[in-house]
Amino acid sequence: MQERAPEMELIRQAQGGSRAAFDALVRQYEQQVLRLALHLTGSEHDAEDIYQEAFLKAFRYLGNFRFECSFYTWIYRIVTNLCLDQMRRRKTRREDHAVVLDRSGDEIDLLASVSDERAFSNPAKELDRKHMGEKIQSALEKLTPRERMVFELKHYQGLRLRTIGEMLNTTEETAKNTLFRATKKLRTQLAELR
Amino acid sequence: MNCDLMHERLLAAAYGELQDDLVHELERHMSDCPNCQAEEAQLQALKLLADAYPVLEPEPNLVARSRMRLEEALDALPPLRWYERMMQRAGNNIARLQGMPVAASLLVLIGAGAGGLGGFRMAEIRAAQAVNQTVPSALGVQMQPMANGTPAEETINISSVVRQPNSGMVEVRYNHVVPERIQGSLEDPAIRQLLMLASENSDSEGVRDDSVGLLAAECRAGHGCQATGIRDALMAALLYDRNVEVRRKALEGLEPYVTQDVQVRDAVLEALMNDPDPRIRTAAVNLLQPLEADTSVREVLYSVSNSDRNPHIRTVSRQVLSQVPEIQ
């Protein structure tokens, strides 16, 4: 609550037209927005576009924010909708799933950039892990955009199902069912790895 | 126990979403169900596998670039116009109202209640005015309030007036939503009020005749026509009733007051000037005879003696005028 009080003040100031207050809100949430968009789209370029569009929308419609939910939920709702639109537009994705493109078009290997700190790690296991990561990304791509979003928000972002339901304008129960379907599909896809 | 349901609960438990009261039930089921134990193992494997596609923190360059691009876009945005700000505020206000359904419902209920009550009061006032307006205003006739709660103002129509033989009792039948009946003495203010209404409103000539006849008899007998509106009712009947017999009876009832009441005298003079029936005009001349010295009476008699279309009335008028020495 103590953390929310200054945030509410920032929001009120931003609603009153304070650009500095809005910038402060952007700095508070930009990492999370980019992280989610990057993981979902697999593209820095798309993540940057989503970031831009999300905060522009937030700026334009901040006057409509009525403190009925947290600002976090509100901004995530905007971002998830934009990500869903993006995923629907890009149903056919690149085959090289473990690789994302940076701004200049260069490839970044997400799996290679994560170090394995386990004591028994070795190059062979690293290779296996990278292979697994690719398979998982491929399996994730085969989910519907909505299933992918629910799994992303639950498994990777660690949000409560209730919050996910709020963000996606649905109920907690529907979010739970969607998560159940997503895990079933993923298990079928990944059966060969086990 | 249904394993499909348990699989759903297993997933909820794996993500920390299972309610506390269901955890124990799930554990008991798991201890006896190899199928669900396998399901749990697969779920844990999936969670482990999924972590092989990690979530990375965005690089500082990406964050800085995104921020700069956003700032440029924000700088390029035109400021909100006044009507856009107004619409935003209006939208917020409406949403706030929607957020308070109880308050909105109360407002609607209060508004409807106040409107209904106001409408009811207005209807009452108008009904009262409508009753009062039935009395001719030319003579300044006033409706007297009823005593003893008699429904005079709400009376719609009087159907009959009957005097009981060998008694001072009168029976008046009237419609008051449903037909009703009241019985009482002619001295009874309620009866008198109904008779006055009957003399002015009833569609039935017989009812008007009966009621005016009774009221006139009361006046001729000297039974308290002073304070009530009976005299006014008789004047109205004399001047406006369509039935000559009713007018004649009204004129008879007014006779005791011609000499003392200027209003009555004026009403009789008007009847003399304008009544279409010569019998009424003749009776009026006779009534005015004791007042031949009155200026207004003389003027009317003079006019009638010259212009009345009935020769008998002209003659009678001249005879009356001839008795006044000043005119000769």
Image (cartoon, rainbow, N blue to C red):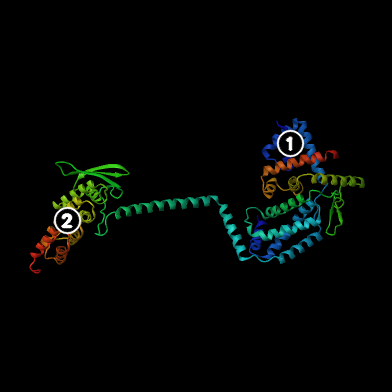
Which residue shows up at 80% across the image and 46% down it?
Answer: A141
- Could you classify mark 2 by the number of other residues whose Cα lies within 10 Å: few (under 14), some (14-19), or many (20 or more)? some
Say which residue label 2 marks.
B278
Residue type for callout 2 = Pro
Front-most of B323 and B214? B323
Quick one: SS at disc 2? Answer: helix
Quadrant (top left, top right, bottom left, bottom right) of the C terminus of chain B? bottom left
Q: Chain of mark 2?
A: B
Which residue shows up at 64% across the image and 63% down it?
Answer: A13
Res A179 quadrant in image: top right
Q: Chain of mark 1?
A: B
Quadrant (top left, top right, bottom left, bottom right) of the N terminus of chain B? top right
Say which residue label 1 marks.
B7
Which residue shows up at 17% across the image and 55% down it?
Answer: B280
Q: Is residue B106 left or right of residue A10?
A: left
Q: Is residue B312 left or right of residue B120?
A: left
* Above/below status of B326 relative to A67: below
The numbered mark, 2 or 1, whose residue comes first in the sequence reads 1
Q: Whole-percent x and y of residue B57?
A: 80, 55
* Above/below status of A136 relative to B314: above
Whether residue A135 is visible, yes or no, is yes
Front-most of A44 and A152? A44
Res A171 quadrant in image: top right
Q: Whole-percent x and y of residue B190?
A: 23, 48
Residue type for callout 1 = His
Whether residue B188 is visible, yes or no, is no
Q: CA distance from mark 2 to mark 1?
A: 112 Å
- Could you classify mark 1 by the number of other residues whose Cα lies within 10 Å: few (under 14), some (14-19), or many (20 or more)? some
Q: Nearer the viewer, mark 2 or mark 1?
A: 2
